[in-house]
Amino acid sequence: MKKKKIWIPILLAAAVLAVIPAVYGNRKPKEVTNYESEKSFEEYQESPEAGAEAGGQQEGIQIPGYESIVIPAGSRNALVELTNPKENDVYFEISFYLPETEETIYTSDLIRPGQSIYEITLDKEMEAGEYPLTVRYATYTADEAMEPRNGAEVNCTLIVQ
């Protein structure tokens, strides 16, 4: 019963987040507020042992959930709000993974705590339909070390229309 109580607010928040880009569309800032660094993402990665510490858990990281994400068919550009809550002490790297084809169709740059991306460019155009989607969160310390932290996966539905 306790699990049901936890998921209800998460699902409601996900539904609200999925609707926001459609409602506010062009009213969002045109600048993407993600973290841009002089180094490429690969330069921040460390050895596989780096992330395996103290049970691999870090408490207090807020991960947004999504029930569905809606994007236009036949276009690589989409309006989707991807947010790193300001309460976090980590950078996010968010990717969209299609489990049926084992394909990653989007990977963000690093996103600072309290900032969002509103416009994304997918790696490929998607045909109309509904697809199972895994939203993957990789997290990194928000300091100069940029050490990997625990990540998360949120399963939802990608709606292409």
Image (tube, helix red, strand yellow):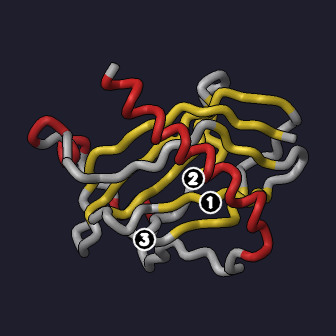
Q: Residue at x 68, y 80 (%)?
A: 29
Q: Earlier in the sequence, mark 2 or mark 3?
A: 2
Distance CA(mark 3)–CA(mark 1): 12 Å
- At label 3, counting other C-alpha atoms closer than 10 Å, the crowd grade (few under 14, some 14-19, many 20 or more) is some
Amino acid, disc 1: Glu
- Tell us which disc is closer to us: 1 or 2: 1
Where residue 43 appears, as percent x and y from the top left, is 37, 63
Distance CA(mark 1)–CA(mark 2): 14 Å
Where residue 151 appears, as percent x and y from the top left, is 35, 44
Q: Looking at this view, is 12 or 18 the one in front?
A: 12
Amino acid, disc 2: Thr
Q: Which residue is drawn at 41% across and 62% down?
A: 85
Judging by the rendered image, the residue that carries numbered circle 3 is: 114
The mark total stands at 3
Judging by the rendered image, the residue that carries numbered circle 1 is: 81
Q: Earlier in the sequence, mark 1 or mark 2?
A: 1
- At label 2, counting other C-alpha atoms closer than 10 Å, the crowd grade (few under 14, some 14-19, many 20 or more) is some
Q: In the rendered view of the protein, which quadrant contains the C terminus?
A: top right
SS at mark 1 in the image: strand
Distance CA(mark 2)–CA(mark 3): 19 Å
SS at mark 2 in the image: strand
Residue 72 falls left or right of residue 152:
right
The image's mark for residue 23 is none
SS at mark 3 in the image: loop
Judging by the rendered image, the residue that carries numbered circle 2 is: 107
